[in-house]
Image (spheres, helix red, strand yellow):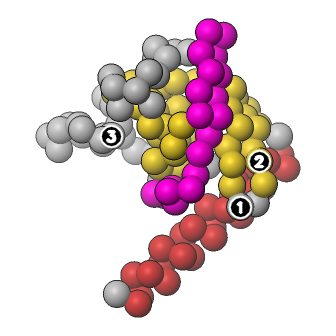
Amino acid sequence: MRALGPGSSMTEKPITRRYPRMKAPKSAVVAWKTSDLREVSRVETIALGGLFIRTKNPPKAGSTVQMLIVTPKGYLRLRANVRNVIAGEGMGVAIVSMEPEDRGKLDRWLRQLATQEENAKTRA
């Protein structure tokens, strides 16, 4: 089973996620690298457990990626595994390690995004 992502069919069954995904703001970017690739890409969705990164040239599933995510709360350094790839569109990655301080920054940022999203819904 694979996660629904951009360009996927609605007939596929979504996987159950431990952490809810949030739509990332347009300003959310990530610098990432593998042993042979380096790129700066836009973050499409993000959660405490992983993210979907827009890139035309994603590494293959199973690759380990080192990342630096730029947030209003500061930089987050982490390591992730590529879980799924949508050719020409991007990759879903699962976070496998990050410092506790960075995890706290990510958690605070996600709470801020959730509050902003909720406020936008109540104004609409």
Q: Quadrant of the N terminus?
A: top left
Report the side of 124 relative to 92 (left or right): left
Q: Is residue 45 magenta?
A: no
Q: Give the SS element for disc 2.
A: strand
| Residue nearest the observer in this picture, 38 or 113 | 38
Q: Is residue 39 magenta?
A: yes
Magenta segment? 22-40
Q: Give the SS element for disc 1.
A: loop
> Which quadrant would residue 14 be assigned to in this image?
top left
Q: For mark 3, does the 10 Å Cα neighbourhood hold few (<14), some (14 to 19), or many (20 or more) residues?
A: some
Q: Give the SS element for disc 3.
A: loop
Dot 2 amino acid type: Tyr
Mark 3 vs mark 2, CA separation in Å: 26 Å
Dot 1 amino acid type: Pro
Of the two numbered discs 3 and 2 in the rendering, the one whose residue sits closer to the viewer? 2
> Which quadrant would residue 77 be assigned to in this image?
top right
Give the labeled residue for mark 3: 5
Q: Is residue 47 visible?
A: no
Dot 3 amino acid type: Gly
Give the labeled residue for mark 1: 72
Q: Position of residue 16 (x, y in %)?
A: 40, 44
Give the labeled residue for mark 2: 75
Q: Is residue 47 above or below residue 117?
A: above
Q: Is residue 56 above or below residue 28?
A: above
Q: Position of residue 29 (x, y in %)?
A: 59, 45
- The answer to the question of whether label 3 and label 1 lie on touching residues, with beta carbons closer than 8 A, is no
Of the two numbered discs 3 and 1 in the rendering, the one whose residue sits closer to the viewer? 1
Report the side of 81 relative to 78 (left or right): left
